[in-house]
Amino acid sequence: MEQLAKAYTDGFVHSGEYVKFRKRKHGRSSAGIDGDKFVAFIQNHDLVGNHPLSKRLSALVNFEQAQLAAAALLLSPYVPMLFMGEEYSEDNPFCYFVSHSEDKLIEAVREGRKKEFKDFHWDVEPPDPQDEDTFYRSKIHWHKRTGRQYRAMLEWHKALITLRKTHPVLNSYKKNNVRVSVTGQSGFTLHRQTDNGLLHLVAFFNLSDETVAFTFPYRAYRWVKLLDSRDGKWVTRSDNDVTGIHPDSAVSNDRIVCRPLSVILYESLQEER
């Protein structure tokens, strides 16, 4: 969780410290470099293609966890990149595939993949990258976007992207305007503000399977809810106890109990005097 917090505020998680798996010091500070110089993502072709079964994140986690991942990315002060189909939670695999004509090169690629998977300690054979079926299995299915769960995820992404485009706080790429506080290994609070400090956003992320309590930051503001992943329009399950439990407004230093696997975004309003 501490590394996630550092990624938000510093851009680089590794900034010159010793990294065990690299067996050397790695990275450098990104102090003074604004967030618009960084591309952030949850998954890409390389990450998915190197999974033993070429599974996307949507095939590895549940709907609520995928919602959290999308919010974590799109509320960050960096340029977001969505992997094709990620916006509606495409769950078809994306395999590593090639279309070479030289037999030696084809065999070299096949052997290279097997060696790579051996280094990863995966106990499976990777799909044959030269097999046409490997390519065809990797195609996305656009028609899925009309299905209930896929459509809900697509609308969730649209809502987050709209906020990025229209809200003054999210228009800023200044890392100095970002604060993150972690709540053990259960969640974190993302606090962002405009350059002049007059407008604030706070997002509470509960990444656990239990309820987690957060405290609103102290500012001379009231807080009004902008987005709630437990709102009925985002919920794909039939249980009715998941909606209407996060308050629509609060004041500084109020405590909020967040449902498991949820994110709630609040905007600051100046208190009436």
Image: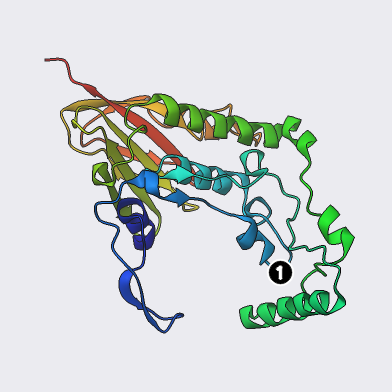
**Viewed as shown, does residue 10 lie left or right of 158?**
left
Q: Mark 1: which amino acid?
A: Pro
Position of 94 with respect to 25 (left or right) is right
Q: Which residue is rendered at x = 15% and y = 28% of the image? A: 220
The percent coordinates of residue 153 (x first, y second) are: 62, 36
Residue closest to the far front: 102
Q: Quadrant of the C terminus?
A: top left
| Residue located farthest toward the left when viewing the structure as drawn | 273
Residue 269 at x, y = what percent?
A: 25, 22
Give residue 211's position: percent from left, percent from top.
Answer: 43, 47
- Which residue in the protein does label 1 denote? 52
Closer to the camera in the image, 107 or 138: 107
Q: Which residue shows up at 45% across the image and 43% down it? A: 79
Can residue 183 be spotted in the picture? Answer: no
Picture quarter containing residue 107?
bottom right
Q: Is residue 208 left or right of residue 4?
A: right
Q: Residue at x 39, y 34 (%)?
A: 265
Eyeballing the image, is 82 above or below 53? above
Number of other residues with Cα within 10 Å of mark 1, as a class: few under 14, some 14 to 19, many 20 or more: some
**Which of 252 and 139 lies nearest the eye of the viewer?**
139
> Circle 1 — which element?
loop
